[in-house]
Amino acid sequence: MARLPRFSPAGLPALVLQRGNNRQPVFLGPDDYLHYLDSLRMAAREHDLAIHAYGLRPNHIHLVATPRGADSLSLTMQAVGRRYARYFNRTANRTGTLWEGRFRSAVFDPAEWMLPAMLYAEGNAMRAGEVMTPEADRWSSYRHHVGIEASALVSDHSAYWELGNTPFERQSNYRTLSNEGLSGRTLATLRKHAHSGWPLGGDGFLSQLERQATRRVQPLPKGRPKREAGAEATEPDESVA
């Protein structure tokens, strides 16, 4: 099946997923996580990508980021992927592919989905039972957003700033949102779009995207298309990754 071209317009945030090849570990210890975050910081600065949230797991990463240029996201992920793979292969005494194909990304409406996407990315370790509290996860941006430590990597989105007029108010309200948790439906929606790559938002948001996109922004209806009189049925079916 043909693969649709990546859709990553400047100024719109995306939820990003990248896995280790065959879901193998890409982080074996604290030094690996630190090296990846440093590589990501340098690549994002070089290619003008704003990182709003991140969550690193032993075999995959999630990012929430806004590209400031049309190629900012792709160039950043390519740069950090190559840089980190060279480091990991050298230190782990291995060869071959580290990452599972190209990364996945889904553009989303920040007005509706920015804070849920951030909490989704940051909450992976806790949902997997790797930590008991989000504060205990050293490898997500949650500690930055609740004031435990400042991250030079994170560029706070306006949706986060709107949580309060002072740092303490923003941090407290963000902690409250985290404690309330995401609904099962919200989690399923974010997970579905993170894996499929289809843009996430309401009808108005998707209609606006369709006017500026050079590819579909919604999947085709399931099932075989109905035949029209005098016309042959077609079966276009591209995948997004």
Image: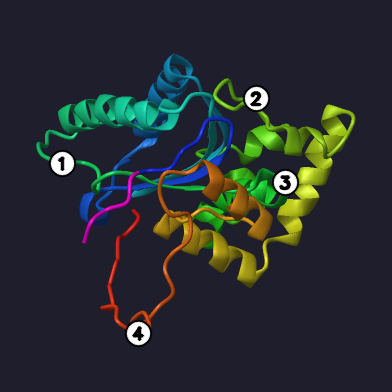
* Distance CA(mark 2)–CA(mark 3): 25 Å
Return the residue found at the far top. 46
Task: Please name the predominant secondary structure of the magenta segment in the image.
Answer: loop
Q: Quadrant of the N terminus?
A: bottom left
Whether residues under marks 1 and 2 lie with C-beta atoms below 8 angstroms apart, the answer is no
* Distance CA(mark 4)–CA(mark 3): 43 Å
* Distance CA(mark 2)–CA(mark 4): 64 Å
Location of residue 169 in the rendering, given as x and y in whole percent from the top left corner: 87, 36
Q: Which residue is mark 4?
A: 229
Q: In this rendering, would 117 be left or right of 9?
A: right
Circle 4 SS class? loop
In the image, which is nearer the foreground, mark 1 or mark 4? 4
Q: Which residue is mark 1?
A: 97
Q: Earlier in the sequence, mark 3 or mark 1?
A: 1
Q: Which residue is mark 2?
A: 150
Location of residue 219 in the rendering, given as x and y in whole percent from the top left corner: 43, 64
In the image, which is nearer the foreground, mark 2 or mark 4? 4
Circle 3 SS class? helix
Q: What residue is shown at x 59% (from left), y 27% (from top)?
A: 154
Tell me, yes or no, if residue 209 can be seen here. Answer: yes
Location of residue 101 in the rendering, given as x and y in whole percent from the top left corner: 23, 47
Circle 2 SS class? loop
Q: Range of the magenta residues?
A: 1-5
Q: Which residue is mark 3?
A: 111
Q: What residue is shown at x 42% (from left), y 68% (from top)?
A: 220
Q: In this rendering, would 232 be left or right of 35?
A: left
* Distance CA(mark 1)–CA(mark 2): 33 Å
Tell which of 44 and 9 is nearer to you: 9
Other-residue count near label 3 (Cα within 10 Å), few / some / many at <14 / 14–19 / ≥20: few
In the image, which is nearer the foreground, mark 3 or mark 1? 3
Location of residue 190 in the rendering, given as x and y in whole percent from the top left corner: 55, 59
Kind of residue at badge 4: Ala
